[in-house]
């Protein structure tokens, strides 16, 4: 097991300096998965640049190769994908192992639902405990056979061709569910409509459109005609906002801190964290907005400031769903109380993120009271201690950020999964003066 220690202050010198500097982030994880899947299904050759070479997205590459797609690794973040068309995949010789990745498994299940062969999707212990009925239900309604083990992976999928059209009223605000239905929709012989209970990230819709698919999306509703073909096209992946979030909070809670993050994806369906921190009094400025591959990209500058606790507006929850672990660190550093509700989905991520963060914050001396669908955090002084990551990359990185303002070192156990989304997190942290160290595997 690999652990991390993170020490207070922003430098190795005796007198802690603020967190400071300029960084670029690795490619967006959500967009990297979609780029591999959709370029594989397109007709022709696509170059993907800025790809995230994290373990989750590498598992998606391996799965698509097992399905007969030729994917060349030009550089770690540059792929050349020889698309086979929506009807060109081949039966895999073995189960497809999606590792730790919910996105990989749920989106690929949508692709496999419309194939003429059977396939099996497996994952690690965490992924095998996450809910899969949410995708099995709509894919079954479209005519595929999707077997689960008590609602969990492994998934055994017997595809059907063509799939049936669907108007799916999703009971859960989940981009993964929406995307699974849309990807299955490429094989449907009629219209596919998904209506969601809240706005979720729209990267699948944007990338389908980038590759020539006619698709309408707005206001929690997306519709497209089934059976459309995709045309290969180069894809530039923006810097990952969810990776940037750790440095956004690190700078926001650092007295005299200032960080500039370049080329970060700021798709409006992803940046709820910026709204939440701004409500708390954070000093954040976006500049140089531009479009990259159908996505909005910007530079983000954050300066340290005094934060006040807030009641998080429920409509921001899905727009910040992956940022809550590190947002809870900001809440722990704010004066007053921060309340989050309507966020039960956090219990179904790589770990139960409400329980994992409440435990770790309590260990560090912060009053953090878990609720069924959220948490109540009273800001205070973070102490030192040993916290458990529960094998969850975002919990591990959130506590590394907490350590920058703690009154002693924080040891974070079992951090190997940081490599699923942010392989060079430690190096980036050190560049802005965070005192993070990898410990030898136990
Ligand atoms: C993702 C969607 C979110 C998010 C996950 C990535 C995606 O999950 O938590 O890390 O790429 O579609 P849900 O859509 O299930 O909320």
Image (tube, grey):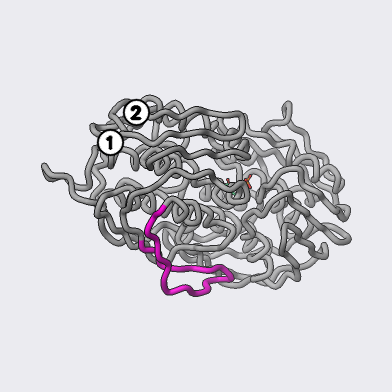
The image quarter containing residue 403 is top left
Instruction: Write the residue at 56% across / 71% down.
Output: 293
Mark 1 residue CB less than 8 A from any atom of ligand 1:
no
Instruction: Write the residue at 25% across / 32% down.
Output: 409
Q: Quadrant of the C terminus?
A: top left
> Which residue lies most toward the front here?
336
Q: Quadrant of the N terminus?
A: top left
- Specify the segment rendered in magenta: 281-301
User: Which numbered circle lies on residue 364?
Assistant: 2
Asked whether the beta carbons under mark 1 and mark 2 sit within 8 Å of each other, the answer is yes
Instruction: Write the residue at 73% across / 69% down.
Output: 213
Q: Is residue 157 above or below residue 228?
A: above
Is 282 in the magenta? yes
Task: State the CA–CA distance, disc 1 to disc 2.
Answer: 8 Å
**Badge 2 density bin: few <14, some 14–19, many ≥20, Cα 10 Å:** many
123 or 436: nearer the viewer: 436
Residue 13, horizontal then vertical, whole percent: 12, 45
Is 288 in the magenta? yes
Residue 87, horizontal then vertical, whole percent: 76, 60
- Residue matched to label 1: 406
Q: Is residue 193 above or below residue 307?
A: below
The image quarter containing residue 93 is top right
Q: Secondary structure at mark 2?
A: loop
Instruction: Write the residue at 73% across / 26% down.
Output: 150
Lateral position of residue 98 relative to residue 230, left or right:
left
107 or 304: nearer the viewer: 304
296 or 72: nearer the viewer: 296
Q: Note whether residue 28 is visible.
A: yes
Per the picture, the main secondary structure of the magenta-coloured stretch is strand
């Amino acid at each position: 097991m690999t652990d991390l220690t993170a020490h207070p202050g922003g430098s190795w010198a005796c007198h802690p300096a603020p967190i400071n500097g300029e960084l670029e982030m690795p490619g967006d994880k959500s967009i990297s998965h979609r780029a591999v899947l959709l370029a594989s299904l397109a007709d022709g050759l696509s170059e993907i640049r800025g790809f995230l070479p994290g373990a989750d997205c590498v598992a998606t590459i391996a799965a698509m190769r097992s399905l007969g797609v030729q994917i060349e690794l030009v550089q770690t973040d540059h792929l050349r994908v020889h698309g086979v068309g929506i009807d060109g995949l081949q039966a895999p010789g073995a189960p497809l192992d999606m590792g730790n990745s919910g996105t990989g498994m749920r989106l690929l299940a949508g692709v496999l639902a419309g194939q003429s062969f059977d396939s099996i999707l497996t994952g690690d212990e965490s992924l095998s405990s996450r809910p899969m009925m949410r995708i099995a239900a709509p894919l079954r309604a479209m005519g595929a056979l999707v077997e689960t083990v008590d609602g969990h992976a492994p998934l055994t999928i017997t595809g059907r061709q063509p799939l049936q059209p669907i108007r799916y009223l999703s009971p859960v605000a989940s981009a993964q569910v929406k995307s699974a239905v849309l990807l299955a929709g490429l094989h449907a012989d009629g219209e596919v409509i998904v209506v969601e209970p809240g706005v979720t990230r729209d990267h699948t819709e944007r990338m389908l459109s980038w590759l020539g698919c006619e698709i309408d999306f707005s206001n929690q509703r997306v519709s497209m005609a089934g059976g459309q073909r995709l045309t290969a096209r180069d894809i530039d992946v923006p810097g990952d906002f969810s990776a940037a979030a750790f440095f956004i909070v690190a700078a926001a809670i650092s007295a005299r801190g200032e960080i500039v993050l370049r080329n970060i994806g700021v798709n409006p369906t992803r940046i709820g964290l910026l709204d939440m921190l701004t409500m708390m009094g954070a000093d954040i400025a976006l500049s140089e907005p531009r479009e990259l591959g159908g996505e909005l990209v910007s530079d983000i500058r954050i300066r340290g400031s005094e934060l006040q606790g807030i009641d998080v507006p429920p409509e921001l929850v899905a727009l910040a769903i992956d940022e809550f672990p590190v947002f809870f660190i900001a809440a722990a550093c704010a004066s007053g109380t921060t309340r989050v509700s309507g966020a039960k989905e956090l219990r179904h991520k790589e770990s139960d993120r409400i329980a994992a963060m409440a435990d770790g914050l309590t260990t560090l001396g912060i009053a953090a009271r878990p609720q069924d669908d959220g948490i109540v955090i009273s800001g205070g002084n973070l102490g030192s201690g040993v916290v458990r990551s529960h094998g969850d990359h975002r919990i591990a990185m959130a506590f590394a950020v907490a350590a920058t303002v703690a009154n002693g070192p924080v040891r974070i156990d079992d951090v190997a999964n940081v490599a699923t989304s942010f392989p060079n997190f430690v190096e980036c942290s050190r560049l802005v003066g965070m005192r993070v160290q990898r410990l030898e595997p136990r």
